[in-house]
Amino acid sequence: MPQAPAIAAAVDGRSTSPEGAGVRAVPEHGGLFRAFLAGPSATLEDAFANLERTPGVELIARLARRRLSGARVVFPPHEGDGCWELTQIGDDVYVVVANVSYRSSRRELVPGDGMIQFYFKLSGDLTLAVSQTEPLRLNRPSLLVYFQPVGFDMQEWSAPSVRERSVTINVRTEYLVENFMTSPEEAPTQLSALLTGSPRQFNYCQLALNSRMFELAARLVDNVYTGALALVHTEATVLELLCATVAEFGAAKSAPIEQFGERDLRCLHAARALLSSQFSPVPTIRQVARAAGMGETSLKRGFKSLFGETLFDFSVRCRMQHALNLLREQRMPVARVAEAVGYSHETSFATAFHRHFGLCPKDVRGQKAR
């Protein structure tokens, strides 16, 4: 989810809420909630600790007896639409709910905090740089569970003009063990591997986002309550969502954990580079696997997991984008464009192009990209 550039310092905010007051603007330089609340390179705990000290952040409520607190950060119209809602449950659980659409790509440095993160993606397009060069893209409903050790920093960035609806529950490992199982030995195999993984390695696995988890996550995004009731609702739903997730780990105990070594990551990126540069003739899976130095099965599974789309879908997307550029910028005849992107028949290319863009090749030929 290439390495993103370092996050620029957040600029001073200003009131831009629909009502004209009370909401500070998000950073002009494209940061996410950490940079907004506590500056570049801020940790999750820094951001939450700064909630009540950040001018303009809307405090939802604080319930001292239940050790609950929450706040909302609203996006101004010129930066996007929507908000982040942040809830802290005691000292062990930090919840970030996103319901936003950004006008431009947002980037942020994410320092490791030694917690288990449960990332429920309902919609949107988020990328995590899980090593110094390799991304993990999440662009469809899914559940990513990962452990990011202290000292392991990564970048994350979100695509523009896409509605991001997600829930991230950050939990201390001790809390998870003490409150959701009678002993560490009881933890399902996959979850246990994350709880006891290497203190220097980013470990993760992806599980199916079943209908129950999707419903609960959507309930958090579309919280119908306000004030203290919103906090209690969030706490109750988060606990139920964690229950459903731990249970899903148990159901998926025989599934392997998705982890990639540096060699695997290099091979997968070599495959991606080949597909994004060779359009005619279109390489076969066997040819891609041989060039990348991987087996075909490992290549197909790893590519889909790492990049969020199949080899075929990625190849078609790259070829269609190249075709669009040839038609618009070079005004190349449709027949020659078809040949240049691996189609032996102009009609087959036109059908694929229309399916991809909703336009016929002849309708865009000669147009300049906006």
Image (tube, rainbow, N blue to C red):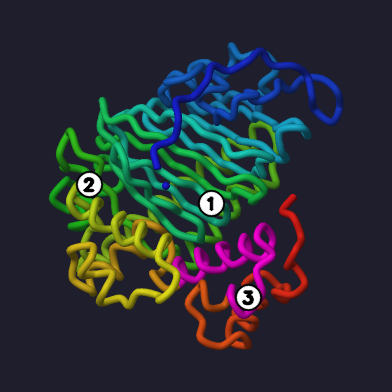
Residue 359 sits inside the magenta stretch:
no
Q: What element carries label 2?
A: helix
Front disc: 2 or 1: 1
- Residue 250 placement, left or right of 162: left
Could you say where residue 312 lies in the image, as x and y percent from the top left? Answer: 42, 73
Question: Which residue is labeled 3 in the image?
Answer: 353
Residue 319 sits inside the magenta stretch:
yes
The amino acid marked with disc number 1 is Asp
Mark 1 and mark 3 residues within 8 Å of each other at the beta carbon: no
Compared to 331, does 238 lie above or below?
A: above
The amino acid marked with disc number 3 is Phe
- Residue 92 placement, left or right of 138: left
Could you tell which of marks 2 and 1 lies nearer the N-terminus? 1
Front disc: 2 or 3: 3
- Residue 21 placement, left or right of 194: right
Q: Is mark 1 on a helix, strand or loop?
A: loop
Point 59% across, 11% down: residue = 53
Numbered range of the magenta stretch:
313-337
Magenta-colored segment: predominant secondary structure: helix
Question: Which residue is labeled 1 in the image?
Answer: 125
How crowded pointer 3 is (Cα within 10 Å; few <14, some 14-19, many 20+) is rated as many
Could you tell which of marks 2 and 3 lies nearer the N-terminus? 2
Q: Nearer the viewer, residue 366 or 170?
A: 366
Point 63% across, 45% down: residue = 160
Q: Which of 203 and 254 is in front in this view?
A: 203
Could you tell which of marks 1 and 3 lies nearer the N-terminus? 1
Could you say where residue 217 lies in the image, as x and y percent from the top left? Answer: 53, 53
Q: Which of 57 and 112 is in front in this view?
A: 112
Q: Is mark 3 on a helix, strand or loop?
A: helix
Q: Nearer the viewer, residue 134 or 194?
A: 134
Per the model, the C-alpha gap separating discs 2 and 1 is 24 Å
Question: Which residue is labeled 2 in the image?
Answer: 194
